[in-house]
Amino acid sequence: MVRLSTLPLAAAAAACAVVPALAHAQAFPARPIRVIVPFAPGGGTDIIARQFSARLTESLGQPVAVDNRAGAGGNVGAEIAAKSPPDGHTLMISTNSLAVNVTLYTKLGYSLLTDLQPVAFLASAPLVLTTHPLVPAKSVKELVALSKKRRGGLNFGSNGTGTTSHLSGELFKLSAGIELTHIPYKGAGAVIAALLAGEVDMGFNASISALPHIRSGKLRALAVSTSRPAAALPGVPTMASVFPGFETDIWYGAWLPAGVARPVLDRWVDEMRRVHAHPDIRSAFERDGAEGIFMPPAEFAAFLRKEVAKYADVVKRSGARASD
């Protein structure tokens, strides 16, 4: 027999359970927002984060500031984001380097798939195989031949161990059957500076970072890493045209710490979608050679699981390793 006297108590208990989540949502945003970029300033991730932060400040009514926390191929900043309070006041914008790190590093202080909540996939861009103009190679084949002539091969700079620029170099080495020496730098800005100074022979750089220097003639573009040519780099061939099946890219996404209240997550998704559709952001993507693609949380999460599996295979084939 149902006791009617228990029904009000049950209803009250259920209502109490809802109150904290609603209070969280109503209080958001209650203070300035931190956008963690797990890479040094000056790279593609930093550029996108600052573009979004400026627009988010307008609509959220709170200052939105980028916090660069570089180290360990993005792992330092990602761990900080994962361990931040899940109240919506810490967002992270990062790249597929985090999907690489799941396999490349044997020890991580966080789980990409369980400690971070996907918010939105934002954009994809090709990596560009670039050299200093003084490097005597004007094509991928000439670069391969040059590396074979040099004892120990050429060297290539990357944004850091575990980044897609690192893994693209390892895949190039594997595909061409050549020796290459990997030189990791602390972020895209640092490796671009090294290329401009002639400190390294080549690198796979995100189009967002490399395009201004390619257009000015300070760097030479030999190929793009995607299977399709890049509209922003007319006449530049694909790596797949030399090595069939070669394909890498760099993509950008946004995460929150796991456990954020659903109303807060929904607010973030709406905000990111709105900024993503802004004409200035769309123009910036096009100018920088990126393709603006918006994926909401569920779609982004499914895509992320596939990326982790894909890069696990590339890491295994290349034999790449990272010290923990």
Image: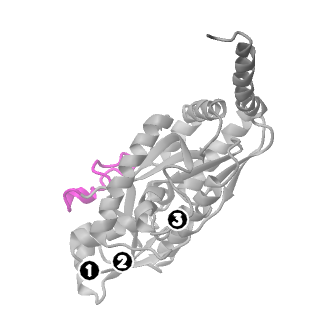
Q: Disc 3 to disc 1, how far (Cα)?
A: 38 Å
Q: Name the residue under label 1.
A: 146
Q: Answer above or below: position of 152 versus 313.
A: below
What distance separates the C-alpha of mark 3 from that of mark 2? 38 Å
- Asked whether, in this view, residue 168 is left or right of residue 218, the answer is left
Look at 49% across and 62% down and name the residue there: 213
Residue that appears at 35% across and 58% down: 311
| Three-letter code for the amino acid on which mark 3 is drawn | Leu
Which residue in the protein does label 3 denote?
Answer: 108
Q: Which range is magenta? A: 226-245
Q: Which residue is drawn at 52% across and 56% down?
A: 111
Q: Nearer the viewer, residue 196 or 66?
A: 66
Earlier residue among tags 3 and 1: 3
**Residue tagged 2:** 135
Res. 215 image quadrant = bottom left
- Is 252 in front, or is 103? 103
